[in-house]
Image: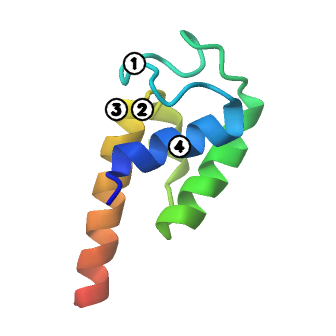
């Protein structure tokens, strides 16, 4: 079973061509040069593959794999809690 971080890394690699082994705390845009045009695709893919709605404000602040992973963990645990309620 893949962790949320593994899934996030795979999505980023598919979209941008960056390696899945990039440092988790590196800024995807400033440190690694991921084109900002990929951000919209990244947002859409995260929402589709995790079946959640990502708030724009949270996504803008999630500029690293660590931050994206934490955001997705929070959103997926909230979604799972809502589904069982």
**Quarter of the image that includes the C terminus:** bottom left
Above or below, 30 relative to 47:
above
Q: Do the numbered discs 3 and 2 sit on residues whose CB atoms are within 8 Å? A: yes
Given this view, does label 1 or label 2 mark the residue nearer the observer?
Answer: 1
Residue ID for mark 2: 65
Q: Quadrant of residue 26?
A: top left
Sequence order check, earlier mark of 1 and 3? 1
User: Between residues 23 and 25, which one lies in front from this camera angle?
Assistant: 23
Colour convention of the picture = rainbow
* SS category of the residue bearing label 3: helix
Q: Do the numbered discs 1 and 2 sit on residues whose CB atoms are within 8 Å? A: yes
Q: Name the residue: 35% across, 54% down.
A: 2
Name the side, left or right, on which 49 lies relative to 84.
Answer: right
* SS category of the residue bearing label 2: helix
Sequence order check, earlier mark of 2 and 4? 4
Sequence order check, earlier mark of 3 and 4? 4
Residue ID for mark 1: 23
| Badge 3: residue crowd in 10 Å (few <14, some 14–19, many ≥20) | some
Residue ID for mark 4: 10
Sequence order check, earlier mark of 1 and 2? 1
Q: Quadrant of residue 48?
A: bottom right
Q: Name the residue: 34% across, 64% down.
A: 76
Residue sitting farthest toward the top: 31
Residue 38 image offset from top left, x and y in percent: 72, 36
């Amino acid at each position: 079973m893949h962790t949320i971080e593994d899934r996030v890394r795979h999505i980023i690699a598919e979209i941008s061509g960056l390696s899945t082994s990039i440092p988790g705390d590196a800024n995807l845009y400033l440190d690694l040069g991921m084109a900002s045009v990929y951000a919209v695709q990244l947002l859409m893919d995260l929402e589709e593959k995790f079946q959640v709605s990502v708030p724009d404000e949270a996504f803008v602040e999630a500029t690293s794999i660590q931050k994206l992973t934490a955001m997705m963990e929070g959103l997926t645990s909230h979604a799972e809690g809502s589904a069982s309620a």
